[in-house]
Image (spheres, rainbow, N blue to C red):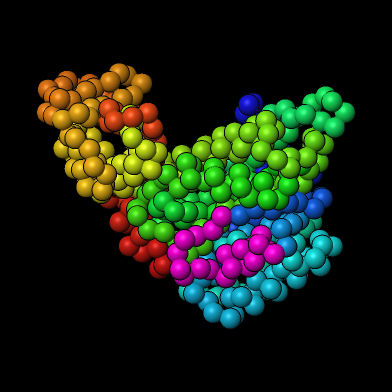
Amino acid sequence: MLSITGGVNAARGFSAASCAAGIKYRGRDDMALLFSSADCAVAGVFTSNIVKAAPVLWDRDIVTNEKTARAVVVNAGVANAATGEEGLRLCRETAAFTGNALGIPARAVLLGSTGVIGPQIPLDKITSGVAMMKETLADTPEAGTKASRAIMTTDTVNKECAVAFDLPSPDGGSVTVRLGGMCKGSGMIHPNMCTMLAYLTTDCAIDQAFLQKALAGVVQDTFNMITVDGDTSTNDTLLVMANGLAGNTPIVSEGQSYGLFREALFTVCRSLAVTMAGDGEGATHLLEMRVYGADTKEHAKTLAKSVVSSSLVKAMVFGKDANCGRILCALGYAGVDFDPANIEVFLEGDSGRVVFYTGGRVQAFDEDRALALLSEKAVRFSCDMHMGSCEATAWGCDLTYDYVKINGDYRT
């Protein structure tokens, strides 16, 4: 698995563009367009929130009933959520306009919106943006990066990733397949499809059913294992488009090629998810919790997520206060039965390791070393349950004063 540049433009046949449509933001790009030169199998995973934004309803219908797509139009600043029939009409008319501009069916156009819930998006700004972006579509890494920046809201950094790997070809040889992606997300992020928009592109030839199966499986250990603030958005969307232009033998079963593709998908999704967790609103640290030696995978996931979701743990990390009791409390109320006398809790990092808890007791430890570990950009805790061989890792961030400042006046 080779890490490469290009993001959503890394794979053959994909191009991207961005523009400043003035939907909410001034002086920056706030729309992005992705386009494939060939039909794509498409798979998606969407928010678990009962209140779903209009673009989520549109995309879910296409993924379920059409199963193919060619383009994605995304805007930042206004979410097109809780907008009733007018919001749905905006989706239909945006898709129709985009389809006409690109020479593809309206039902081949996927949509994404992120930002403030409630306001209507002016259709003329969307269509003007699409018209501008059609003229600047490019397959360069720079165009992909600009698209990843255009979909940001409170994000402080753009988020993109791409990999290359080899798969068998019909002539008995092998071909290089590329898979890349971009995402946005900084607040309203919690497991069970966290608040985010994420778009993945690949030139792999893969059956739509197996593309969906791979995505639905990978999301469980990547995007569903991060949290920032415990809130799940109305707009969560994760889409992957596969146009088959790599020329590999099509993946139509769960063989070795499917396993390699799933590994690549996991690599990209994990990278994007961890970057998102570390860029939580106001965050100064990435927070990681690894639980291992658990009796079941589900118990390991529950315990790990309980720790990174704890407001007290997050505040502890912000204050660099090595208060092991907060880790223990979060493990104890997670809803998983275990013997506290048998577990061990550690703080780990580039500069060493501190044993926080073992043998049923909080241990004496070097406060200066603990402070050094808590001062690293990524703060990592781990817990050995001594119950089995299952493990899981969850990611979050610290809770800072700036989180309240950002969200106290997010709309105004």
Asked if residue 73 can be seen in this view, the reply is: no
- 85, above or below 47, in the image: below
Question: Residue 399 at what x, y percent from top left?
Answer: 29, 47
- At x 52%, y 37%, the residue is 271
- The answer to which of 170 and 363 lies nearer the viewer is 170
Looking at the image, which residue sits at the far top?
352
- The answer to which of 181 and 319 lies nearer the viewer is 181
Counting the numbered discs, the total is: 0
Asked if residue 61 can be seen in this view, the reply is: yes
- At x 16%, y 37%, the residue is 325
- 125, above or below 193, in the image: below
Quadrant in the rendering for residue 379: top left
Q: Is residue 400 magenta?
A: no
The quarter in which the N terminus is drawn is: top right
Question: Residue 308 at what x, y percent from top left?
Answer: 32, 43
Quadrant in the rendering for residue 382: top left
Looking at the image, which residue sits at the far bottom?
85
Left or right: where 297 falls relative to 335: right
Q: Which residues are magenta?
A: 45-65
Question: Residue 199 at what x, y percent from top left?
Answer: 62, 50
- At x 45%, y 64%, the residue is 49
- The answer to which of 294 and 374 lies nearer the viewer is 294
Q: Is residue 55 magenta?
A: yes
Question: Residue 39 at what x, y percent from top left?
Answer: 80, 53
- At x 75%, y 71%, the residue is 96
